[in-house]
Image (cartoon, rainbow, N blue to C red):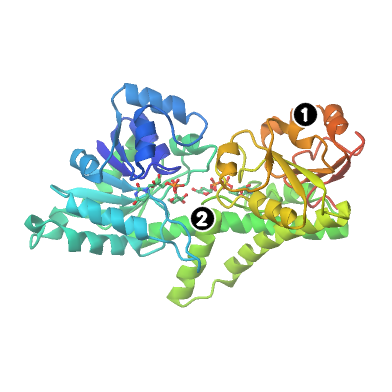
Amino acid sequence: MNIGIVGTGYVGLVTGVCLSAIGHTVYCVDNDREKIKKLRRGIATIYEPGLQELMTKQTKKKKLFFCETIKEAAKCSQVIFIAVGTPSKKNGDADLTYVENVARQIALSMDSYKLIVEKSTVPAETGKRIEHTIKLNLPKKFNGRNRSLSFDVASNPEFLREGSAIADFMNPDRVVIGVESKKAEELLKEIYKPLKTRVIVTNITSAEIIKHASNSFLATKISFANALSQICDRVGADILKVTEGMGYDKRIGPSFLNAGIGFGGSCFPKDVDAFIRLSEKSGYEFNLLKAVRTTNEEQKAAFIRLIEDKLWIIKGKTIGVLGLAFKPNTDDMRNAPSVDIIERLQAEGAKIKAYDPQAMENAKKVFKGMTFCNDMYGAAKGSDCLLVLTEWDEFRKVDFKKLRGVMRQPVVFDGRNLYKNDNLVELGFEYFGIGRGKV
Ligand code: UDX
Ligand code: UDX
């Protein structure tokens, strides 16, 4: 099928490239001219393992195109995915300005039946809003005619994790489609048929809730593990053994129970906020989810307190940082825990030196007054302590003797328990992990 994708960010570009890889002809569009120019030159505008190669291949096969206007993309497509940003507003609401703007532009370019699909994570009932916006902006010739002849709206949330987005697209646990007509259901089933995966069919609002509820539950698991880590540190238990022991219970499962400095990224914080707000507006106080958010903030504060306690004086200290991105295998800095942690230490007078394998470009737009280093030893050189904030594989291959040699004080605060099995104490370091029962 011919498919349009509006928005070529982490969600849109991966979705477009992968839909084309499973056999469709895809027209991607973005209102950021620079992005479209780079994409047309064959350059992927985000880092995602395997994306550049797959994008090059699909472009060569003339199954993937980049357009400047929605009109252009809509003209060639029967199904159009909306994958533009839905950032958080100050009060936690999802900002749907872009979504509304795109819905209107699609309506104005309508020249035949279209299926408009929400790919972006949006609060429940956004589908109804999109439908209303399109109806109000349909070209005259559609007016009066039976609406279903001209368009349908559907919800098809993504469950892509940054750093494994292509694998997550190609081997999904399930595809969720929220539809209000048989035609829309058929079209979406046709699109995903090559994946031969389980398809959950429901109405639009339920599909929207599935997305917010899934992300919120995953965030709840992480906050539960982080709260446990605080207890483990106080009673001398080991969080790694505690979560291992829990995880063998199939009802609990081992994943998303890694204690650390908390969850970041462009999804969990935003989706937890939006779900809390949506619940409030529907008349229900989602206190459990508010506690998940509070626990996440508290985990970063606890990490700072640990550093203050063990380092004694922060002012004037040189602190080396390994990892800035919100998780490994991505260049994405959105809501990365490293931002809060580094800014608080800088406010106390620390000098920060940092290295991240992929996120340096984006980090330079976020941090002020920080020294960016070319590798982990550069970040550790002359430091009074070293913080591990992102658990990149690259940091596992380390010569601890060399690391010890370049540091001014051999103190390591391991915010992601990366060196959980390396026994740094025997190697001459003072080592503090998360929830290892050592404080
Ligand atoms: C984000 C969130 O991460 C995701 O949870 C949500 O489902 C959708 O929004 P992401 O792809 O990460 O997805 O957003 P971003 O990287 O900001 O990409 C959005 C793209 O849409 C940008 O390239 C932006 O230029 C483009 N855009 C935005 C348009 O093309 N038109 C607009 O009107 C607004
Ligand atoms: C998430 C969801 O997993 C994905 O399904 C959804 O589509 C988008 O949001 P993403 O945000 O890309 O994906 O990354 P994820 O791997 O979920 O990690 C999110 C955050 O949680 C990261 O900051 C990560 O460091 C943190 N995390 C994850 C933990 O702290 N502990 C864990 O056990 C797992």
Q: List the residue tagged with mark 1.
A: 398
Relative height, residue 154 to residue 36 (above, below): below
The x, y position of residue 420, in whole percent, is: 79, 40
Q: Residue at x 82, y 40 (%)?
A: 383
Residue 277 left/right relative to 128? right
Q: Amino acid at mark 2?
A: Ser
Q: Residue at x 67, y 36 (%)?
A: 392
The x, y position of residue 432, in whole percent, is: 84, 47
Q: Quick one: quadrant of the C terminus?
A: bottom right
Q: Amino acid at mark 1?
A: Val
Question: From the Cβ of disc 2, is ligand 2 less than 8 Å away?
Answer: yes
For marks 1 and 2, the one nearer the N-term is: 2
The x, y position of residue 331, in whole percent, is: 56, 39
Q: Which structural element holds mark 1?
A: loop
Q: Quick one: quadrant of the N terminus?
A: top left
Closest to the observer, 67 or 169: 67
**Does the residue at mark 1 contact the one at mark 2 (Cβ under 8 Å)?**
no
Q: Which mark is residue 90?
A: none
The image quadrant that residue 143 belongs to is: bottom left
> Few, some or many C-alpha atoms within 10 Å of disc 2 (few <14, some 14-19, many ≥20)?
some
Closest to the observer, 63 or 191: 63
Tag in front: 1 or 2: 1
Residue 439 appears in the rendering: no
The x, y position of residue 96, in whole percent, is: 38, 60
Q: List the residue tagged with mark 2.
A: 214
Closest to the observer, 253 or 221: 221
Residue 75 left/right relative to 254? left
Residue 351 left/right relative to 139? right
Residue 284 left/right relative to 289? left
Distance of label 1 from label 2 (alpha carbons): 36 Å
Q: Residue at x 30, y 45 (%)?
A: 188
Closest to the observer, 319 or 421: 319
